Amino acid sequence: MFRSCLLLVSVALLLSCGGGTPREPEIRGPETDANEGLRHATGLHIVKEGNGITVIHVESPWPDAREGFRYALVPRELAPVVTLDSDAYDAIVTIPVERVVVTSTTHIPALVSLGKVQSIAGFPGTGYISSPAARARVNSGEITDIGTNEAINTEMVLELQPDLVIGFAVNSGNKAYGVLQQSGIPVVYNGDWTEESPLGKAEWIKFFAPFFGLEKMADSLFIKIERDYLSARETAAGASEKPSVLSGALYKDVWYLPGGNSWAARFLEDANANYLWRDNDKAGSLSLSVESVLSRGGEADYWISPSQYTSYEEMENANRHYSRFKAFRNKKVYTFAKTQGASGGYEYYELAPSRPDLVLKDLIHILHPGLLPEHEPYFFKPLE
């Protein structure tokens, strides 16, 4: 039930974010020696100190966190000669790491892109993994299922002997992380999911890179994503029309849809669309009645992300009110739910935060037919 509720709330938060074998989109960018710093992520700071130590500051590991975390990364060759005050850091990690446990599917694309998927030793709930490269390692037994993120099997993690656990948490209540830290396994929190801008989330590939000494590669990969995203946004800005957009769907008589200041709403803004709840300043999801949504969105031109639905028949059978919307009647409803991994996980949840360029191009292709005629939609497909 917890996962079902989390899924439905995530639908609203991730642009309320087909068929065939899942593809692993390639990211190829120019090699560069320049570390241009963090330009979009607001909850991450990385400092290269003169003694060869890298310090990572995670300012917002979860929403409304009272304080952030500081992690010191010490090159293996310096570990015998450098003495650090352990009280000054939340974890001290010897780098490069070789074996890691990750706890959110959003962590996986960064490691795949950096060529380090083989470093993943464990994951809670491997059935949710969509990445073909990671799934192959799950199927071969090289990635161990360690339970659930709410109740990680600490004994299994200890048996894996990872160099690092990259944690995901909605608050400070996960006791398993404390057990692992007391056992000598460093735990670092990743806060990419608290970022509100598409490029801000994607820039967290630079959080993963220092643990492997791959900062230059991460810079090159992100530069390519950033360039493609900004180019697509500029293309959308030249559209002659600004279509109106509705999002979300009902769950137990409550309609969940993205707030006007959310990650999802930013995509629609950058796609030059008129998201009908853009005037709301909430960064999370809104909880509304069907009457309220119908009053404002009944005549919307497009409906993006109708929860988990993949067909018009399925929607109408679930609730007759859906057929009252113009976008439904005109067959202008688009979903990410048709793009699934081999085990049924939604690729959007796993990959979209790392590849906002693909999301934005999908939306522009849908909302402004003709602007990106060569783009093949990756996440968003029309309902059947």
Image (tube, rainbow, N blue to C red):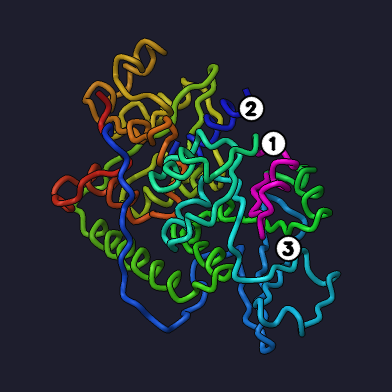
Residue 110: x %, y % from top left = 47, 57
Determine the residue positioned at 38% across, 42% down: 275
Front position among marks 2 and 1: 1
Left or right for 55, reference 313: right
Give whichever of discs 2 and 3 has the lower sequence position: 2
Which segment did they paint magenta?
Answer: 148-169
Residue under the image location 33 percent in, 49 percent down: 24
Tell me the kind of residue under disc 3.
Phe
Contact, mark 2 vs mark 1 (Cβ under 8 Å): yes
Mark 1 — residue? Answer: 150
Quadrant in the rendering for residue 231: bottom left
Which is more toward the observer, 56 or 303? 56
In the displayed structure image, the side of residue 261 where residue 101 appears, left or right: right
**x%, y% of residue 338?**
33, 31
State which quadrant residue 207 falls in. Answer: bottom right
Image quarter in which the C terminus is found: top left
Mark 2, residues whose alpha carbon is within 10 Å: few (<14), some, or many (≥20)? Answer: few
Q: Inspect this view and state whether residue 301 appears.
A: no
> At 54% across and 73% down in the image, what residue appears?
213
Q: Which residue is mark 2?
A: 2
Tell me, for residue 26, which label it has, or none: none
Badge 3 density bin: few <14, some 14–19, many ≥20, Cα 10 Å: some
